[in-house]
Amino acid sequence: MISFKHVYKTYPGPNHALKDVTLNIERGEFVFLTGPSGAGKTTFFKLLSAFDHPTSGEINVLGDNLNKLTNSSIPNFRKKIGVIYQDFKLINDKTVLENISLPLKVKGFNHKEIVSRANNVLEQVSLGHKANVYPLQLSGGEQQRVAIARALIHQPNLLIADEPTGNLDPALAEEIMTLLEKVNAQGTTVFVATHDLEMVKRKKKKHIEIKAGVVSGIL
Amino acid sequence: MGYFKLFLEQLKYSWLKKFSLQMTTLLVMVGSFLVVTVTVLVLNNINHIFKEVSESFQVSVYLTTEGEKEEHKAKIKTLIEESKIFSDVAYVSKDMALQDFKTKMAEQLPSFVLEENDVNPLPSSFALKINEQFNNKAGFNKVGSFVDGLLSVIGVEDISYGKSWVNKYSAILASYNIGSLAFILFLLMSVFLVVGNSIKSSIAQRRKEIEVLELVGATRMYIRMPFILEGAFMGLISSAISIGLTYALYQSIVSISAANNAESLFANLNLQFLPLHISLLICLASSVLGAMSAMLCIGKMNTGWAALSD
Ligand SMILES: Nc1ncnc2c1ncn2[C@@H]1O[C@H](COP(=O)(O)OP(=O)(O)O)[C@@H](O)[C@H]1O
Ligand SMILES: [Mg+2]
């Protein structure tokens, strides 16, 4: 499902952001990616979601060789994955419903289908009653749940989350994690970057550790 | 159709969020297009008037007494007809010329009365009209050399025609045409920049939304089309408004000149408004201009994860 083969990523400057990363993740897994700030987690997810090219090495995701994606085929690839960001990336002057509709709108779904799917996924993240509210009227945890709903609405096979709980207090973080586990239980492969080692230990899931761009352990 | 809906959303957004910027942009564009359409209108009318004047332009071939003899007269007439330069070859006898002169004088200077028994001082002549296809520089040269040749034919006293007049004005007209075109190009360039600026601001305003759209897999077309349509729309609307204003201006000039008929500068000019196809062409060109300007401003919008790396 995801395979990295000897992947390097170098930004202008002396150090490698990623150095000889080789790993495989199977369909249906729940995987944590951990490492201190600056270790290369975001860089890793950028490559994984085709937002940047590796300097060298080969990346395959969901049957696509990302090295061979052209500019015009990248949007099609992104439509197959769901991504969650630490800063939510919600549009503040669109309602919750409008925000989470975007992936389906981009895919050309009709309005009726969009609304029915949006209501379903909002129920899933327990925000059924907030469909017509604006993001800034929501708490941090609620905003992140909206972002999760947006990442799930098009039923992707792979969900990646870059420090989804980084801005949340521990109780809310736990709530979000439980939600992600629920999504995983329904068959979606979930890949979560975090530097919250305590939680990773508690969850007892597959755990990839990177330090200074190098994979230092797969537990 | 989907793009059209997106474009309407985009339009609503721009006008609600940045009304004063949109309004300023629109006003500048209407102003520029107004100058463009008025220039085109003036250009069109001057060219039209010039064409009318030179079409009705007469050449008179004056005959000597010798020339009035049938044999010479017939020979001159044949020469003129065979040249195929002229349509309408009319013989004006001494009497007709005098009659004409008298009526004209009566109109202009009623007190002037010609004594009946005076000798008729006017020569007889052929009045010719230049064929339309000679209404150009090359044509005038041909007319010129034909006239030079005709002058040496027995019976021809003199030939009056406006060669120098027509040449002079066609030269002035040509430089005026070129000058106006340069001026119009300059204005269109400024419109190009103004539209680009407004679209850039629209993009900046929606930066975050564009980023999110990219993240969820929107194609470049999906993201750009609303902005391109917005640019085209700005071009279309502002040029249509300018044409409307130009029409109002034209109508008021026409009605003023109708009101104080004879004294008016425009009284006898038979002014025309821009033909429909020119108006439509201006609207189309403005839309294309707006769209192109927007397209150039969109550039590379892929920001993606950039915000996350810091
Ligand atoms: N766009 C960039 N240009 C230059 N250096 C970058 C860029 N993005 C990340 N880096 C560097 O790459 C390294 C890994 O960064 P990042 O992947 O953001 O780490 P993490 O997400 O684990 O905190 C850091 O040293 C960072 O400074
Ligand atoms: Mg990061």
Image (cartoon, rainbow, N blue to C red):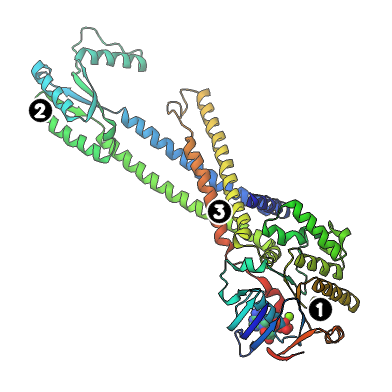
Q: Position of residue A38 (x, y in %)?
A: 72, 86
* SS state under label 2: loop
In this view, the mark in front (1 or 2): 1
Horizontal relation, residue A93 to residue B259: left or right: right
- In the rendered image, the quadrant that contains the N terminus of chain A is bottom right
Horizontal relation, residue B274 to residue A36: left or right: left
Residue to which mark 1 is pinned: A166
Residue at disc 2, CB closer than 8 Å to ligand 1 = no
Q: Which mark is residue A158?
A: none
Q: Residue at x 61, y 90 (%)?
A: A14
Q: Position of residue A157 (x, y in %)?
A: 72, 70
User: Do marks 3 and 1 share a subunit?
Assistant: no
Can you tell me which quadrant of the image ligand 2 is in? Answer: bottom right
Residue at disc 3, CB closer than 8 Å to ligand 1 = no
Q: Amino acid at mark 2?
A: Val
From this view, report whether residue A186 is shown above or below residue B59. Answer: below
Q: Amino acid at mark 3?
A: Ala
Instruction: Work out whether mark 3 precedes mark 2 in sequence or the reverse, and give the earlier one.
Output: 2
Q: Position of residue B176 (x, y in %)?
A: 39, 44
In this view, the mark in front (3 or 2): 3
Q: Nearer the viewer, residue B33 or B171?
A: B33
Tell me if residue B244 can be seen.
yes
Packing grade of label 3 (10 A; few <14, some 14-19, many >=20) is many
Packing grade of label 1 (10 A; few <14, some 14-19, many >=20) is some
From this view, report whether residue B169 is shown above or below residue A164. Answer: above
Marks 3 and 1 sit apart, C-alpha to C-alpha, by 42 Å
